[in-house]
Image (cartoon, helix red, strand yellow):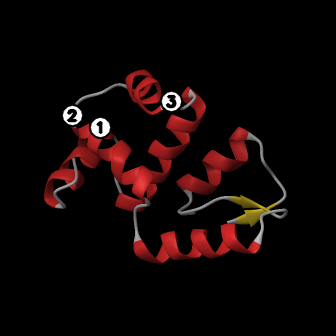
Amino acid sequence: MLTTYVDDTSVLEALRAGARSYLTKDADRTDIARALQAAVGGLTQREAEILGLIAQGLTNGEIAERLFLSNHTTKTHINRIFATTGSRDRVAAIGYAQRHTIG
């Protein structure tokens, strides 16, 4: 999704609606190209890493601490993972990780 909105509500609503990436209109060509490649290719490297940590049973806070991310950024990645994998919750995401040998 390419937009002018950057508030948390807009980001989460877009991800829940199926957006695989969220960029603001000031994104450069490289960022847009990466987002398009990620949307076509599925999980990004970071999302796969986080999904693996979810599969290991880590909480959002533990994931954020281990990867030096904010809690907000971690939640955003997890919502993207749910959207990309079609998972409604962590249990479904873990099932996806197991079926695709992630983690």
User: Are dots 2 and 1 in contact, CB under 8 Å?
Assistant: yes
Mark sitting on residue 53? 1
Residue 61 spot, x, y in % from top left:
44, 22
The residue closer to the viewer here, 16 or 1, is 1
Q: Secondary structure at mark 1?
A: helix
Observer-side mark, 2 or 3, equals 3
Q: Residue at x 61, y 46 (%)?
A: 12
Residue 70 spot, x, y in % from top left:
58, 29
Mark 1: amino acid: Leu
Residue 46 spot, x, y in % from top left:
44, 51
The residue closer to the viewer here, 102 or 78, is 102
Mark 2: amino acid: Gln
Q: Secondary structure at mark 3?
A: loop
Q: Residue at x 53, y 63 (%)?
A: 20
Mark 3: amino acid: Phe
Observer-side mark, 1 or 3, equals 3
Q: Residue at x 71, y 60 (%)?
A: 23
Q: Disc 1 to disc 3, how far (Cα)? A: 14 Å
Q: Residue at x 24, y 29 (%)?
A: 57
Q: Is residue 62 visible?
A: yes
Between discs 2 and 3, the one toward the N terminus: 2
Give the residue at mark 3. Answer: 68
Q: Quadrant of residue 62?
A: top left
Mark sitting on residue 80? none
Give the residue at mark 2. Answer: 56
Quarter of the rendering occupied by the N terminus: bottom right
User: Are dots 2 and 3 in contact, CB under 8 Å?
Assistant: no
Q: Disc 2 to disc 3, how far (Cα)? A: 18 Å
